[in-house]
Image: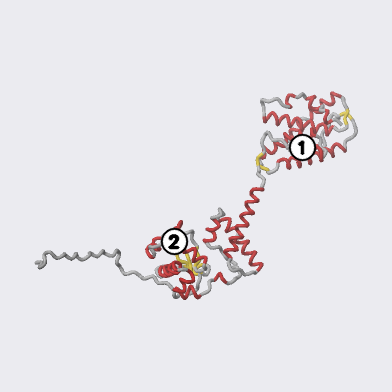
Amino acid sequence: MNRYPNAPQSPPPLARKPIVNALPEIPLTISPSLAVQLGVEEALLVTVLRQLMTTLSGHEQQGFRWYTITEVQLAAAAPFWSARDIQRLCTNLREANVIVIASAPFSQSQLLKFAFKTAQQGPVGASVASAPPQSTSPNIIAPHWQPERDTLSQLAQHNIPDTFALNQVGEFITYWRERNEPARSWESKFFNHVIHKWRDFQTQAKQRPKVSLMHKDWRPSEDAMDVLTRHANIRREFIEDAVPEFVLYWREQGSSCDNWNRRFRDHVNRQWARYSSTLEHDTTPRRIPEGWQPSRDVYDVLRLANIDLQFAQTLIPEFVIYWRDSNQAHSSWNTRFLQYVKRRWAQRSAEAAAPNQSSTRDMSLEALVTDRSWAD
């Protein structure tokens, strides 16, 4: 019973809130000297990684002992950091030559594959702060050196594929081993080497001419015609006659080329050399003999022009009959037959390409064999 009913009542005792997950935890301690050298958060992450390493089985590779930690494991050990924080701190430790990283950025892969750049696995402060990082002293590149995953990830940010970068490793190692020069950071040298190679590759790709197939309406450019007529002194009619057979041959071949004009110029120059040689060695005007046959040089020219030799042979009888009936004399029956065959071949090609269009097939036999542009 309250002896003083009018006295103020004392409040009831405050109820204590239960502590969430009030379980024993391993305390996180950091080395003051390491915090001064690297930063407080970075030193704390070194502690976290060291503690997680005791629960993992690492593997030896390239002189390091590698460990792989998942995002779940890091979140349990350090819930106060986000994935971006982990990536930022890992990058700082890598740049400080404390760890090496062989995985993609943590915020993307949710995986951290790392190794400490020290041979000792003693106390955190002593092992990291006192042992000199391996990359701070110059060294000769190893014969089987390979770039770190982090370097390839940085190159990928420049749109350089891993395959292209790895293809440069052999040349990179050979060059620096022949020079026998030490370097503090082979990763940095390799990064710059690949960037330079990639820029050269892109420049060459832009300058590289595009290859194309031969199309049925192809014509040599005016520049190509000018080179052949003015500089090589080849008759324009001769060049025009060479176009249909040239187009037909390369369409049937299905080959591609980066410069059809250059290939055509070479083709015409070869034909003209043969034609000129034939013309020079046959200068006596005479009637065509009854059993006349073209010389071997004629077949050589036709072969260079990619004209079917059997097709040419079928034209010999009508050619001989026409000129024997006309009773005319000429200095070079080989030359006249050569041009006759070329015109008939062009006629045949035009009929195959456009059967419904008018072409040289409308020309008479007399017009074909008496072409005055090829008169002696």
Please tell me which residue lies in front, 335 or 373. 373
Res. 174 image quadrant: bottom right
Q: Is residue 28 left or right of residue 267?
A: left
Way the structure is coloured: secondary structure
User: CA–CA distance between discs 2 and 1?
Assistant: 69 Å
Judged from the image, the secondary structure of the residue bearing numbered disc 1 is helix
Residue 197 at x, y = what percent? 62, 56
Amino acid type at mark 2: Asp
Residue positioned 76% across, 24% down in the render:
363
Q: Is residue 274 left or right of residue 197?
A: right
Residue 161 at x, y = what percent? 56, 54
Q: Is residue 296 visible?
A: no
Residue 7 at x, y = what percent? 14, 65
Q: Is residue 142 above or below residue 224?
A: below
Mark 1 surroundings within 10 Å by alpha-carbon count, few (fewer than 14), some (14 through 19), many (20 or more): many
Residue behind mark 1: 225
**Closer to the eye: label 2 or 1:** 2
Residue behind mark 2: 85
Q: Quadrant of the C terminus?
A: top right
Q: Is residue 12 left or right of residue 297?
A: left
